Image (tube, grey):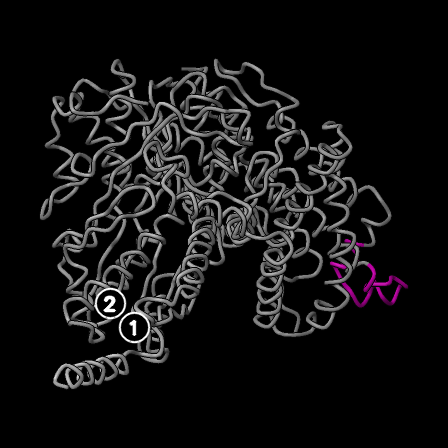
Amino acid sequence: MVKGLWALVLVFFGVVAWSQRPAEIRVGIVTFLSGPASVFGIPARNAADLLIDQWNRQGGIAGVRIRPIVIDEAGGAERQVAEFRRLALDERVDLVIGYISSADCLAVAPVAEELRMPTILFDCGTPQVFEERRYTYVFRTAAHAALDNVAAALYILKTNPNVRTIAGINQDYAWGRDAWELFKGAMQALKPDVRVVGEFWPRLYAGEYSTEISRLLSLRPDIIHSSFWGGDLISFVRQGLGRGLFGRSRVVLVAGEHMLQELGRTLPNGVIVGARGDHWFLHPTSRDDPEHRAFVEEYRRRFNRYPVYPSYHMAQALLAMRAGYERALRATGGRWPTKEEFVQALVGLEIKTFTGKIRIREDHQAIEDALFGQTVQTPQYPFAILERMILFPASMVNPPVGVRSVDWVRTLRPELLRQVPDPR
Amino acid sequence: MSGLLFLALLDGLVYGSLLFLVAVGLTMVYGVLRILNIAHGSFYALGAYVGVVLGLFVTQTLGNPWLSYPALLLAAVLVGGVLGPLVERFVLRWAYARPEVLQLLITFSLFLILEDVQKLVFGVQPYFLDAPFQLLGSAELGGVPYARYQLVLVLVALGVLLGLRFLLRGTPLGKILVAVVADREMAQALGVNAGRVYLLAFSLGVGLAALGGALASPTVTIAPGLGAEVIVLSFAVVAVGGLGQIEGAAIGALLIGLGRSLAVYLVPELDVVVPYLVMVLVLLVRPVGLLGTVEVRRI
């Protein structure tokens, strides 16, 4: 009799707790749907569509379905701030996942804080966000430019220890400037006798690089560093290829992974390519992981392409959201968490991703492993894939909490190279 | 050192040629129609897209990559011949008599519409066509390999400049065009069909924009946003040379091209600002541009 009563009470509380659950989790998803940066934005949205559909079919998060509200990131930072306010105040979203452009991240983060809106920055690369301010509501679930460029420097010095001269060609805006600064700093710290022979700053979306290529050809640096992306990257590769640039110098494309499928057979072998983290559909340790394989196959079936790093970055943000809700629900004993409880649950969270794991640190910046490799054309794929890959552990390529990236790269010591794993 | 200087001049010439091919259509349309056509950038992008699609078709389906050169020209003719008359007839024709601000708004909205049309038709993936660039290979110039295709572009730009000069100065059609520009009413009174002249001039301008895009597509990757990039630089070129001046566009393109290449050789930090620096310097000295003429307002 008493047992029965207890059961009834439990059911009653269960029903109350359950009835407090929202009808849906409203997620604002902001990514480039138009403009040149849609080469990142569309693969990211594709990944979001795929995962949200799949999770909703399985009942959502703890029984609550996810409802995405997708916004185009094009139009500049001011417009994004206005859109963010609209998402928070009119659409009444529960959280926002978004932002590829660093300028948008920097503009939106303070507004998110002001509106107390949980916000997960999923892709933007500027180290500044959490190095210059602390946030309660803002997180980033992907690593930033320090990882890309330190891993690039380590990869180069591991595989080509005799490098003497380097040159950089980067777009003249925050991303290009940050990338070169970090790469140059890391190279000079890891091998102090490396000489910089050229630094080129073409306009973003310039598309025409014959002058820079002429200079690079006559300078003949051992290494050419570029953080180009999208159409600019393809233009540079094609124009350089037509003039033998890839035969004279070794080229490192720190964000090159997202354009491998577009470049197809055009890209020669031996180009050093990074993936802004450890994102690669043929990842050396997780290519056969069942969840990863299912993701890759489903992505390919639906969108007729392989997922690229922005897809993985979006997946990381969504996985973090799900893990955050689940952890918060455990902490509240099943009561649906408030926004504050949700953001608290994200801090310190360690999440298994498709290719590895991320850990959200106390400064709200997640760290992840880094993957670099060299291109090789094979008969199996109609585009270059990576070989001689090195998987750098997260602790090696991300600055510690509270240290600015530019200061951190200067403290790197040549001895670090001994800890770098061999390529495989 | 002389090798480097030669290379810098060559790079400037190559870049200037690309700029000229885009800007000349813009300046010609302004010269005849007195409309600053912001949609010019879209026609450039459309020319590039159509050029790539046709070029890929002839290389992949017909299996002859050499046909990609005529395919690029055909793209320019198609875009100019189909879109030019349509836009002139149905959009611009009733904009001529309206205030300049309205004309700007009309061509700007046209630009936005065409940008979306591109996305609808071609998607957002980058497009490129390698055949025309690779077939010609490279030659050793100034100590470094230089793509022959880019040298061909210099010749094409020169050909377009001379061709337009001949068209305007040496043919009856050119004389009629000049007459309509000088005094439309008088020309009409003498039996010239001014409407048709406008239609022809605009279509030629669109065709030139498309030609610029199509010829750039073997080196520059075609992606959304291309049109916006191009229009800004074209305006700089046209402002330097003087609005409506074809030779002016050539000089403007050359100045900006050389300025930029010297910047890359000497102070790469200035790469981005050079086109605008050249423009500001020229406009400070000659507010109407190098070859521009002072407009007489008819009351």
Is residue B189 a member of the stretch shown in magenta? yes
Q: For residue A94, which numbered disc appears in the image?
A: 1
Q: Nearer the viewer, residue B259 or B105?
A: B105
Q: Tell me if residue A219 comes above or below residue B62 in the rendering.
A: above
Q: Are marks 2 and 1 in contact (CB under 8 Å)?
A: yes
Is residue A274 a member of the stretch shown in magenta? no
Q: Picture coordinates of residue B269 (x, y %)?
A: 32, 37
Q: Tell me if residue B187 comes above or below residue B52 in the rendering.
A: below
Mark 2: secondary structure:
loop
Q: Picture coordinates of residue A328 (x, y %)?
A: 19, 66
Q: Please identify the dominant SS of the magenta region.
A: helix
Type of residue at label 2? Pro
Label 2, residues with CA under 10 Å away: few <14, some 14-19, many ≥20: many
Tell me the quarter of the image containing the C terminus of chain B.
Answer: bottom right
Most extreme residue toward the front, as rendered?
Answer: A1
Residue indicated by mark 2: A118
Q: Nearer the viewer, residue B101 or A25?
A: A25
- What subunit carries mark 2? A
Type of residue at label 1? Asp
Q: Nearer the viewer, residue A414 or A168?
A: A414
Q: Which residues are magenta?
A: B177-196
**Number of numbered discs:** 2
Identify the residue at horizontal 47%, vertical 35% (top origin): A260
Identify the residue at horizontal 76%, vertical 62% (top origin): B86
